[in-house]
Image (spheres, rainbow, N blue to C red):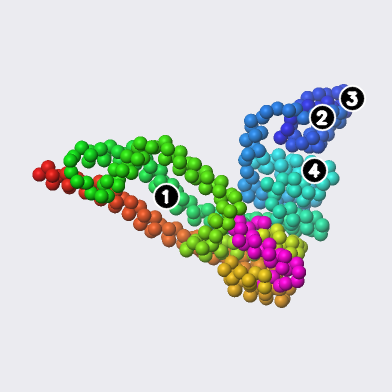
Amino acid sequence: MAIFNYSAAAKNGSTETGVIEAANLVAAGHLLKEQGLMPLDLTEKKQRNIMAFFVGMTTVPLKEKIAFIQNLDLLLRSGVSAPRAMRIIAKQTANKKFQNTVTAMAAAVEAGKSLHEAMGEFPKIFSHIFISMVEVGEISGNLEKSLEYLRIQLQREADLKSKTKGAMIYPGVIISAMVIIGIALAIFVLPSLTATFKDFDTQLPFTTKIVISFSDFMAGHAVLVIGGLIALIGGAIAGLRTKAGKRLLGGFLLNMPLISPVVKKINMARFARILGSLMKSGISVVQGLEVTSQAMDNVYYREVLEEAGEAVKVGKPLTEALGAHPKLFPFIVTQMLAIGEETGNLENILDQLAEHFEAEVDDTMKNMSSIIEPLLLLVIGVVVGFLALALISPIYNISNSIQ
């Protein structure tokens, strides 16, 4: 939000001056008019606002966007104008950044812009899917129906992400705890234990020598190790955001045993749900493929859908374009899509495919913990057994040498 110095005429003819907070200049003018003031002069007050900086750095959760669409649909169906509806929604929005965004959109629509154009000013918040479905709804005069399809698609996407993240939390917490505890033991605990073994002139087992060398290195280079680990994680995150990094990660996930089937099902569910929702709202297959490709996280699926869009544009069937990539799109998928194209019922077939793969992902994620848990227990058992062997074996050697 910006701060504006204003000079305005009141209803009694007097002139008032002061400051007002608003998303932009147009929004500031509307706020003054709502207060019964006629703006005479409005200038933005330049200031360094730390709080505004942090608000700008925050993200808008998917649940906030779903609530926005749901409330906007409800208010529009009730006959409320779009600008007024958005101002009502903004007042009850908890996320400060999204509140400012919705207020700015209301001002933009009041100034003559369409709703999809107002959303287009915030591409980091509203995806291409958002804007395209709203645009089609405005053009067709059936915006409420487009918002309903959009809400369903976003809700399904939120459910899919929630299930995926939920299945990954348990192993993620366990692995993180293992790494942190392992580093703490190596730096603070093991050196005091291994120091005892060094004082005795006896042959130490090979496992004990490994533990002593490791603990000595960690204790002597603790800052370097921790700093290097943080730098490695940061570098990996930055590298995975590059084109080469995304290709590397995408290829790894598609070829990794156990993980690959789940990744393919998630991408298939996302593809079918998004394309089906777009087509139901009135978007053509070609445009739908273009928008869907931009929404895919895996770069290989994105490239295939872009190629499919170009192929369909020149007259090729969708099934033929996707069928050329059987590793990404299984035979059963292309056959069902072929039936949909033949019967002219492609969007309903896509919905059925989405529900099928979403159900499979749900079942897989429910069983994921039962698959991962024994593997983690096995790793923990091996590490604990190795440490026990390394620390207990020299005790017997020392006892024998003393005797």
- x and y, in percent, of residue 262 in the image: 52, 62
**In the rendered structure, which segment of residues is drawn in magenta?**
294-319
Q: Kindly identify the amino acid type of the residue bearing the numbered disc 1.
A: Ile
Q: Main secondary structure of the magenta part?
A: helix
Q: Residue at x 84, y 45 (%)?
A: 112
Position of 122 with respect to 329 (left or right) is right
Q: Secondary structure at mark 1?
A: helix
Residue where numbered disc 3 is placed: 13
Q: Kindly identify the amino acid type of the residue bearing the numbered disc 4.
A: Ala
Q: Are marks 1 and 2 in contact (CB under 8 Å)?
A: no
Q: Considering only order in the chain, which callout, 3 or 2, is on the residue closer to the N terminus? A: 3
How far apart marks 1 and 3 lie (CA) works out to: 69 Å
Residue where numbered disc 2 is placed: 42
Q: Considering only order in the chain, which callout, 3 or 1, is on the residue closer to the N terminus? A: 3
Q: Considering only order in the chain, which callout, 3 or 4, is on the residue closer to the N terminus? A: 3
Residue where numbered disc 4 is placed: 108
Residue where numbered disc 1 is placed: 174
Q: Which dot marks residue 79?
A: none
Q: Residues within 10 Å of mark 3 (few under 14, many from 20)?
A: few
Q: Nearer the viewer, residue 400 or 77?
A: 400
Q: Secondary structure at mark 4?
A: helix
| Furthest residue in direction right, as rendered | 13
